[in-house]
Amino acid sequence: MLAFVITMASLMTMEMPVTPETDARALFRSPDSRCRMLKIIHGWPQQPDATSGLLDSVAKQGYGGVVTNVNFDGGYTEAETNWTRFLHATSELRRRGMSAWLYDEMGYPSGRAGTLVLKDHPELEVRGLMTLSRDVAAGPVEIEAPEGDLLLAEAYPVVRGAIVLDRRVPLRSEGRKITWTAPRGAWRVVVMSVGKLFDGTQVACSGYPERTPYVGLMEQGLTPRFMEFTHDRYTRRMGKDLAKTFAATFTDEPSTMAIYFNAMPWGVLPWCSDFATEFRKRRGYELKPALAALAVEAGDRGRKARADYFRTVTELMTERWWEPLRRWSAANGVPSGGHLLLEENIIHHVPLYGNAFEAFRHMDSTGIDCLSSDPTVPRYASMAGMGADVPWNAARLASSVAELDGKPQVMCEVSEHIQNAGNTAKNLTEAHYRGTWGRLILGGISVLTSYHSFPGWTDERIKAANDWIGRCMAAVSGGKREAQVAVVYPTETVWARFTPSNLWVEQISPECRRVEETIRALSEALYRSRREFDYVDGRVLAEGRVVAATLVYKERRWSAVVLPECDTLPEAAWRNLAALKKAGGTVLVIGAEPRNCLDHFPCRVAASAARTLGTGMADAGSVPGKLDEVLKPDITVAADAPIRMTRRRIGNEEVWFLLNDSMRPWSGRIVVPAAGPVEVWDPRDGSIRTEASDAVALEFGPYDVLIVRRGAS
């Protein structure tokens, strides 16, 4: 408990959210370091004067501070010269009153301390479950197994598209060669091996140091060894100055590594050396008889096995990676933070984390990255939504989890990576950057950390951009989002439907892909219709309470819950949703109807909920209209206006952050649901003006932002 108190105290003092009591108006006019973007600096000069000059430049450009670490080169945390440079730099940061986050790795992804963790410990290298399946006809069959130690080689009869697990036929193997003579009928061969996971993965294609093996985050003992070379050394070197210097740690894209970035001959799933043992202990049955169901369709029994499998992945990632980091943070007064890999797409979340919502839940400061600074790129136009655009919805996911527990810091690492790779960064204007940052802030980001290169920009131009960011953050930081609508993050449904691919997630089934397409379409429809919402998961639904036609969870309260292609949830979640509907609340079902609980496929409780909730809607695009029938609007504006918004309550004030999500200027009348006068805050120049009524005439330039605030009534 003491450690928890220390962590929360650090959260409130290092990055204290802006409240009316801290004079938000003065802070808006002149934002301090807490509100400004942080520049990412991975190495410090040898000479103290050069360090001072570098920080002078950071301040001159309007940054509030830095994200930093011990220099990568020359031995990383093992080199005394690196510590001398780092300790001088952090002393200067404290003297200047600059904000800072502590980067926890020698490059990325986090977990390996460059090459130090795996040195003399090859057993900690990441493992994968490589999968191969093939439909075969009668006659001779010869298949080459995936690399690694053969775990399964069996054939199964196929009935109505699914294998029959209880009629397995073991196949003969010689090395990697699998042979069999198939009888007449429809058969599916499944071959699985366990091996080290490198070729085709993120660390084989990118990362730093380049082409360096990765570690198994689910392996027992991995995280303490990683922290021995990183976190623990920072503690010993800095002592109490650690918490005085850093607002949070920054872990960078740690994952199970179980997605292929380049095509491979087989698919992959997460694994660790004691996974089968842990599965049996946690789920109460042996995994191997149902192992083939992880790769191919096997009916209800197979879908339950998949859900149990990914539930186990989630638990091992939580217990062996996220929680050790968080315990260190609690003990040292520096909140745990950073961002995940491929946060934009729920289908990626499952093989990489089991459950990204749960991963965020076990971070003190959640975060994402944004690799593009061009909001004109159509959503999901390329890279399957994995960074080609500005992922406001990923920001909303991370911030939704943070707000459930009152965590004030939600970070986004920003850059022009996509534009730099395409040699188009020089074409970006202030409007492009404003649109990028505006979308992220609208999504719930409260801290921006920057790899921006700003090609061709002067110091004055960069400072003006940082002033704009600082004013936006000062205007909306703190308080809570005023959302009447909860959108379910249907990870349990993806668990039950997921099958592995040999490149990204290209080979998943159409019904699994439909989950992602539905939640994406729903989120975009709510965004365009200016309807505020939070994401929630099965745990929130199960642990919440129904009070006066609303779902209540801790300090959050929602009048409507929307289920996008969601057929599997905890039993208690289905009970609460049915109770909410019976109490007069709104529950909208899109596509799939309630069918399964985590312990039963199918489930009688889910079937009962389905009867109460009614037939699913076919189209996510019709949800805003249905919500308008039962809920008051968050703002009123012309239907075709490009205005997007987020709504917050900060102390006794209501705040509307309004973004012109377009390269075209827009002007018009906007009505906020606030009786009496309101203030209009303009982050372009820090001005504040009062309007006599809640109907306000506003003018926006391309991707401009204006903030409307209503004081205590």
Image (tube, grey):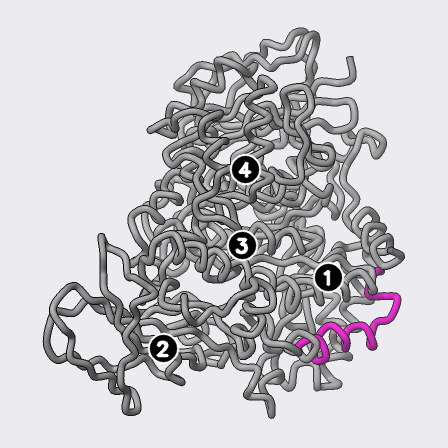
Which residue appears at 39% of the width and 63% of the height? 294
The single residue placed furthest to the front in the displayed view is 166
Dot 4: few (<14), some (14–19), or many (≥20) neighbours within 10 Å? many
Q: Earlier in the sequence, mark 1 or mark 4?
A: 1
Specify the label residue 355 is tagged with. Answer: 3
Q: Amino acid at mark 4?
A: Gly
Q: Closer to the observer: label 3 or label 1?
A: 3
- Residue 121 drawn above or below residue 581: below
Q: Are marks 4 and 2 in contact (CB under 8 Å)?
A: no
Q: Nearer the viewer, residue 458 or 559?
A: 559
Q: Earlier in the sequence, mark 3 or mark 2?
A: 2
Query: Residue beneath label 4, please?
Result: 438
Q: CA distance from mark 4 to mark 3?
A: 28 Å
> What span is in magenta?
226-244
Q: Earlier in the sequence, mark 1 or mark 2?
A: 2
Query: Residue beneath label 1, please?
Result: 326
Which residue appears at 34% of the width and 69% of the height? 267
Q: CA distance from mark 3 to mark 2?
A: 26 Å
In the shown orientation, is residue 108 left or right of residue 555? left
